Amino acid sequence: MSSEVAIHVSNLSKCYQIYDTPRDRLKQFLLPRLSLSEKRYYREFWALRDISLKVQRGETLGILGRNGAGKSTLLQIICGTLAQTDGSVQVNGRIAALLELGAGFNPEFTGRENVYLNGSVLGLSKEEIDNRFAEIESFADIGDFIDQPVKSYSSGMYVRLAFAVQACVDPEILIVDEALSVGDIGFQYKCYKRMEDLRKKGVTIIMVTHSTGSVLEYADRCIVLDKGRITIDSTDVLSAVLAYEKGMLSQNTKVAATEVKELTAERPLDVRELQQLQAAETNREINEKRFGSARAIIRSLEIIKSDGKSLAEEPIVRSGEEVTFRITLASTESINDVVLGISISRTQGSDVWGDNNLNAGYILNLVPGTQVVEYSAKLPISQGDYLIHCGLACVSMGEREELDQRRPIQQIKFWSARSQVGVVFAPMKVSQGNLP
């Protein structure tokens, strides 16, 4: 393998044997050995099929894919913690990997003892770990818990210590599999800054994440896995992310679109029917919470970009672009003095933008059946992943009735040609001159 190639995966496949009952597993173990049966008592599940790729030294590779696409299986085989069924993997360099929460930790050992245990597994001598320990302890920032058994740690503390060990031992290859999503936003920022420092040192990085914003910001190359196969492998990271997001959105909206069409028939709606729809139509991909009396409900939200294309066609909004929120409502009766609000928040954090028809000076009254309301706004929001929340309420006679609250209802991604600090995208212009 060339010294410029850090990882070479060739025709890699992984098959699992799926048994319906423990009895079938026992039959498969005994009967063929006794020459009593040639029948197979299991089903084959191919987690990976014929994967081939080369990762260059110093490259940052982002891997995207739905749950069950084979991302974690691929990383485990590369790290050597899982054996492949077919194919080969060659690794040129010392790997530091953060595959899952607490992997490699002994729960009975203290944090300090686990630092030395993990360091020795990575090939460091005690003296080398001694020299790095202060940096690891400072980065983890878990205080006196460094001398407590890790079985008493919270999930966030696990991640802090695990990442600190992996990132501070000068790895040649760093592999991170979704574990950073557990940490708080401040620690995530510190981790990504550390990864940026490692990139500048020429460390090869493979990152698996559901945050396509992180892939856009850090990756030199992106691959997309689907059902165990590579469907996209491109150094045009933006195009790869767009294709992935488009596929995700189209799958998530198929059922909702069909159900909206079925309700457009001119027939009366009752509260029980809307309550059933309210309970059934939730976005489980983003853990949506939904509640309200359901006298009227929010059936769907469609986002139209300034070029007339929907977010399902082009899943990234440019910072400062005007978008239209097309909201389909269904009501059992005439309801006056309705407030329909929409807001955008960080994936972890408070709202960064929001508005409603009352603030805009528009009186909204509902009639029985379905209707569509459109809001338009320019959103100068910085690059990143965000969540959209939508709420419908009645504020008649000074009392508020929650009709349907959907928090969050959908994801949205903003992209800009340059990054900024904060959530408002307002790039500055720089000039220089002499004092008068």
Image (cartoon, rainbow, N blue to C red):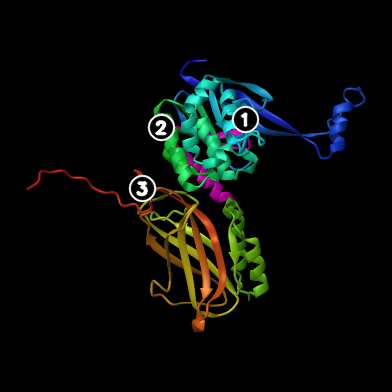
Left/right placement of residue 301 relative to residue 40 reads left
SS type, badge 2: helix
> Which residue: 61% across, 70% down?
265
- Amino acid type assigned to the residue bearing label 2 in the image: Asp
Circle 3 residue: 421
* Of pointers 1 and 2, the one earlier in the residue sequence: 1
Using the rendered image of the protein, determine whether residue 128 is visible from the camera's viewpoint: yes
In front: label 1 or label 2: 2
* Quarter residue 306 falls in: bottom left
Question: Is 384 located above or below residue 283 in the figure?
Answer: above
Residue 197, numbered circle = 2
Residue at screen point 45% across, 26% down: 203
- The answer to whether mark 1 and mark 3 are in CB contact below 8 A is no
Q: Which residues are magenta?
A: 223-251
Query: Is residue 207 shown to the viewer in this render?
Result: no
- The Cα–Cα distance between marks 1 and 3, rounded to whole angstroms, is 35 Å
Of residues 130 and 371, the one drawn nearer to the viewer in this rendering: 130
Tag 3: amino acid:
Val
Confirm or deny contact between disc 1 and disc 2 (CB under 8 A): no
Mark 1 to mark 2 CA distance (whole Å)? 25 Å
Distance between the alpha carbons at the discs numbered 3 and 2: 18 Å
Magenta run includes residue 235 = yes
Mark seen at residue 76: 1
At x 54% / y 50%, what residue is drawn? 249
Badge 1: residue crowd in 10 Å (few <14, some 14–19, many ≥20): some
Q: Earlier in the sequence, mark 3 or mark 2?
A: 2
Residue 179 on image: x %, y %: 56, 40
Q: In the image shown, does 78 or 128 lie closer to the viewer?
A: 128
Task: State the image coordinates of residue 273 (x, y, percent, origin top left).
Answer: 67, 70
Residue 11 x %, y %: 61, 23
